[in-house]
Image (spheres, rainbow, N blue to C red):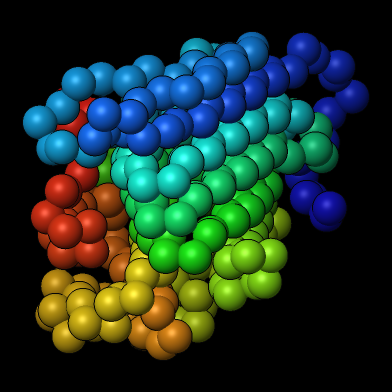
Amino acid sequence: MENEGIKSSAIMQRMFGKAAASFCHRSGQTVLHKLYQEGAARLHFPHNDKGCFEGVMINTAGGMTGGDHMIWDIRLGRETTAMFTTQAAEKVYRALGDIPAKVDVCLSIDEKSRLYWLPQETILFNRSALQRRMEVELADHAEFLLCETVIFGRRLMGESLEQAFFRDNWIVRRNDEIIHAEALWFGPNIAEDLIMPVFLNGSGVIASLLLIAPDAGRFTEKACAIIGYLGGVSSWNGKLLARMIDKDFYSLRKRLISLIGLLNNRIGVPKVWSI
């Protein structure tokens, strides 16, 4: 990986975390089946009034930097429904070497199950480096909603990005066949990328949403109305893909919450989003 200007000979201790959990259907509801936690990764399961099992991912290190590695492994059994988020925004700080921080996400959704994957925003700081990979396996009649938001420097706090590296890869399979794949790559001269019309056209935040469901196409018209001119939406073959951009997250948030509520049957956003 080329990451000019982000080098150091210092050898420092790196953070590692892994959390794995599986869920099953019991007595008419989704319940925790197995749980494993290691290092800086923790999973909490707060009560809510949404009628949907909720999981909260916690990075006890308080952020990430180059060389850190976080793994999340979530598996939904047959006829289960769950919503996952993070306790707070994930902050990716300046990397002191040429090795990026890594986040690996592995999701498995069995038949007649639904997973709403709604982490809070990822914030990139100047000279940060992040490589994220998500692999999703769906069974027949399984549904999935993904929302990932990336902030390229918090403009309301006077932050800007000149040098940073960000790579995001998604691979979604149904019965071992790839049904969706995409890669997003910015940097290392990220300031030049962000001003290009083909990328963010000077915007400071981007939200990507992917819905996989048999009736995903029926939301297209309403999703377009919510997104407006700062983004777009497409639907095909039981999928809906939407992008939203704005100058900062505060300006994006209202539209994002409305769109999530539309796509997940009015369950809305996780409780911790309002804290």
Looking at the rendered structure, the number of numbered marks drawn on it comes to 0
Q: Is residue 233 above or below residue 202?
A: below
**Does the image show residue 120?**
no
Q: Residue at x 63, y 23 (%)?
A: 18
Is 176 in front, or is 226?
176
Is 207 in front, or is 240?
240
Is 2 in front, or is 235?
235
Q: Quadrant of residue 205?
A: bottom left
Find the residue positioned furthest to the front: 27
Q: Residue at x 61, y 44 (%)?
A: 106
Residue 222 x/y as whole percent: 14, 79
Q: Is residue 134 above or below residue 228?
A: above
Compared across the picture, whether 115 is left or right of 173 comes to left
Q: Residue at x 63, y 65 (%)?
A: 175
**Does the image show residue 253?**
yes
Q: Quadrant of residue 243?
A: bottom left
Compared across the picture, whether 122 is left or right of 31 comes to right
Residue 262 x/y as whole percent: 16, 64
The C terminus: image quadrant = top left
Compared across the picture, whether 128 is left or right of 51 comes to right
Q: Quadrant of residue 25?
A: top left
Residue 51 x/y as whole percent: 15, 37
Q: Is residue 64 above or below residue 107?
A: above
Q: Is residue 17 above or below residue 131?
A: above
Residue 203 x/y as whole percent: 36, 66
